[in-house]
Image (cartoon, helix red, strand yellow):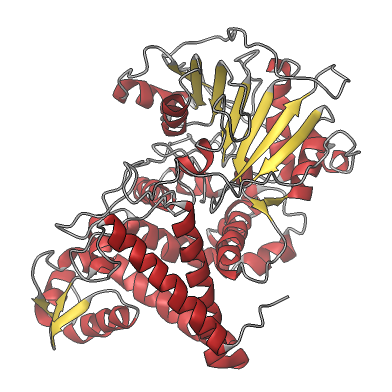
Amino acid sequence: MSSTRTLPELAQVISTQANLISNTYNDAGIQQPSLGYGTTHYGGPYAPALEDSRAQLLEAVDELRALIVGPAGHIFFMSFMGPAWTATLHVLYKFEIAKHVPLNSSISYADLADRCGLSEPRARRYVRSAISFRVFQESRPGRVQHNAASAILATSTLHDWIGMATEELAPAALKVAESMLRFPKEDRPAESAFAIANGSNGDKDLFDIVNDQPERMARLANAMEWSMRVPGMEPPYTVDHLGWGTGKGLDPTWCPRVVVDVGGGTGVLSKAMLHAYPNIEKLIVEDLPEVVTQAVAHDPDDFGGRLEYHGYNFFTEQTIKNADVYIWRCVFHDWPDSYATRILRSQIPALKPGARMIFLERCLEPPKPLGHVSDQFAMSCDIMMQMCANAKERSRDDWVALLAAADERFEIESISIPPHSALSIINVLWRGDETSDDAKPPEASSPFYSGSDVARSDSVSTFEPDSSSESESNCSHKRAKMLQPEDTSNGTLNGTQTRLATEYDHLTKETGGYTGGNNASFYNRGSTSLRNHKIAGNSSNSFLY
């Protein structure tokens, strides 16, 4: 059901929430939001009350625009502006226009065109198109200078995201319908729209295609690094709500001693957990050998031996045995169900009864009357996963079915959605041979694993899903029970104070550029198509989002 708010009602919401946000910034001594060049923009996380105001304001503005342009205009403008946006952004990327505009002065269209290798009319056309979308500004007619948006494009990996969006995702988007017709099962990454757009006949997936092209690989790495800075994806949104031994959150009275961060890249999520939960005795980051080799080489031991790295391919049997928690952040959304089932089964030999598997993943919900903006982002992520890998974001029922297909001894104990987090905390218990409903996490024991904080150099094998995986998806769900999401409405990200400054993301006043933390790099997973493809340097470690 859509919202039925009137124009005056929407205007009231916009006025109220805009004033609340402005007052919050003033009280904190923070500069008001602006697209003016050189302004500082804080990207989050925010205090819960401020998050609420931002969400309500964005939703009201989006609804107001749809009402003003009308039903036909709403559809028309999406279809009309979309191609123009794509063309404009691609020209900005291909000719590096933002990088050729000086950061601290203006430039004439003639000089800019000369720097970019364009004719002056073409340079003017596409810069003015960008200006109409609030990117760049003219200091006076005929002279271009940066605003805050274009400066970010000039000084950050957002530039590579634009390149990937226009050169990789846009062509794939036009092949989605074809992929559905040619491969109706949609269960192999090599049969995705992206694969078809790149000439694959079902024999190569995205990473096979770009693996031998260093420029595309580097762009993909930088694009993924940028995408992980999206509000709601930063580690505090989920890490702070695990609550291990803090008296609140997921496990208020219990803290695991041994945690494994599967597909954890260079360990940003793990480091956040070690900072937040000092009672964790050992946290082991698993990723491909080449990934952890890089991590060990560049990561000082700031945790007194509590942090280790271990080379591992999650399609093979888990080598770290008897840990208390195995945590996965944005791993399963990279894979179709048949592949995700294989990943889960590979963990079973290592699990002791009462062990936890915690997934930090999206949990899609039915459409909400006042949640269109957040739903737009979530569903865009879902479509991109299907477009690029025939993978998906999952609903509650999807998670139930996936775990039941892998093994009925997996039991979802809870799904909690921290306020304004893009990811849910899906808490899965491994029952093992236990049959009672009162099984509790046992005291942790030291993990028994091969390897150490030095990465292994052995090769990583590939696999094809079992032919029986499709029929197994229809098995009983009796043990994979689903509970309602936990009520986290009273939770906070980090206390009750307004959080307008953290170590994660901010813009410099000097350039207006995005300096942010959690920089990521893509890990070359080799020439095979079914290796762990994780993103390092931020705890999201996601293929897309």
Q: Residue at x 73, y 44 (%)?
A: 337
Position of residue 179 in the picture relative to residue 222 (left or right): right
* Displayed quadrant of residue 413: top right
How far across and down, in percent of the image, does residue 500 sit?
34, 51
How far across and down, in percent of the image, does residue 49 sit?
48, 57
* Displayed quadrant of residue 473: top right
Count of all numbered marks drawn on residues in the image: 0
Residue 76 seen from this side:
no
* Displayed quadrant of residue 379: bottom right
Task: Please name whichever residue, 379 or 181, is drawn nearer the observer in this view of the structure.
Answer: 379
How far across and down, in percent of the image, does residue 476 sit?
91, 38
For residue 202, above or below residue 281: below
Task: Please name whichever residue, 219 or 225, is drawn nearer the observer in this view of the structure.
Answer: 225
Task: Please name whichever residue, 346 or 27, is drawn nearer the observer in this view of the structure.
Answer: 27
Q: Residue at x 66, y 11 (%)?
A: 443
| The N terminus, quarter of image | bottom right
Residue 184 seen from this side:
yes
Position of residue 203 in the picture relative to residue 297 (left or right): right
How far across and down, in percent of the image, does residue 434 sit?
84, 17
Q: Residue at x 29, y 51 (%)?
A: 506
For residue 259, above or below residue 514: above
